[in-house]
Image (tube, rainbow, N blue to C red):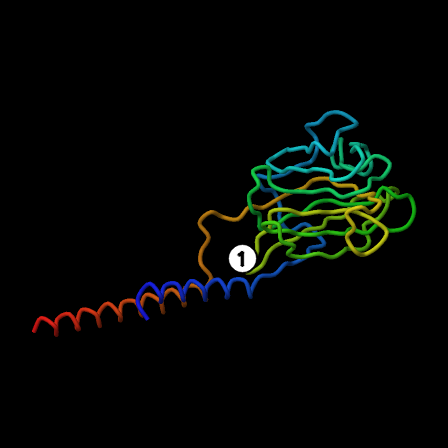
Amino acid sequence: MNIKGLVLALAAGLSISTAAQAGVTVHNGDFLGATGNSNGFEAIGGTFYNGAAGYTEGGVKVQYVGRELTTLTTLNPVGKHSWTPLGGGSGYTKISLADGGDFSAIEFLAGGSNWFGNAKLQYQLFQDGALVFSGFVNGLGNIASSSLKTIGFSGTDGQLFDELRVQSISGNKFNKYGYDQLILDNITISAPLSSAVPEPATWAMMIIGFGAVGSMVRTSRRRQAYAFA
């Protein structure tokens, strides 16, 4: 195998290793703390807002995908405003970084605008248009509850996301046309570090690769020396 072939093989091995280790952790409490990307809906100032147009604050973009306006009300908010479809919506809320970049973790406050029973949160996490992880969370509480529940997601072993879709409907499975009664507030996103340190397995592969390339170069030099002798 020549040097180019060896490098390509090593690159393929690293890609396979990274994909195999990807995963997601679901959090049921505050785990991020303060970051530079936070959206609490406080800068809008009005009671009603066109959710389909999208709203950006603190580098976080929130957009409602459905047929309803979004009302910013006093339904269990932190501050003066929160985000919930007016009278219930037919759709879901999409959350991303305003610049479209990747993020490694996200947390937010969530509840239901229903008056009776405990609300559920249905969610989908995406990376480059591909569904990475989905599911539901029980026990959000309803409009009569004293507080919203903190929910979050973080990638493990290098897993990143670029979009989160959330809603609160009656079933367990995400339904982009479902009757949505989700209340959202205080969304916080953690972007990955630009100079990430390689994983130990990656370091090992790199060292093996460098050693193999060096050995091939030395062998090639010896052959050239014999040819000139």
What amino acid does circle 1 point to?
Gly
Q: Residue at x 56, y 47 (%)?
A: 102
Farthest top residue?
A: 46
Q: Would you say 160 lies left or right of 173 here?
A: left
Residue 103 at x, y = what percent? 57, 47
Q: Nearer the viewer, residue 226 or 204?
A: 226
The residue under label 1 is: 158
Residue 160 at x, y = what percent? 57, 53
Q: Residues within 10 Å of mark 1 (few under 14, many from 20)?
A: some
Residue 56 at x, y = what percent? 64, 33
Q: Nearer the viewer, residue 222 or 40?
A: 222
Q: Quadrant of residue 109?
A: top right
Q: Quadrant of residue 13?
A: bottom left
In this picture, is 218 found above or below 133?
A: below
Q: Residue at x 85, y 41 (%)?
A: 113
Q: Quadrant of the N terminus?
A: bottom left
In this picture, is 223 found above or below 92?
A: below
Q: Quadrant of the C terminus?
A: bottom left
Q: Would you say 210 lies left or right of 205 here?
A: left
Q: Residue at x 58, y 59 (%)?
A: 156
Q: Would you say 112 lies left or right of 162 here?
A: right
Residue 193 at x, y = what percent? 49, 48
Farthest left residue?
A: 229
Q: Residue at x 51, y 62 (%)?
A: 18
Q: Nearer the viewer, residue 218 or 147?
A: 218
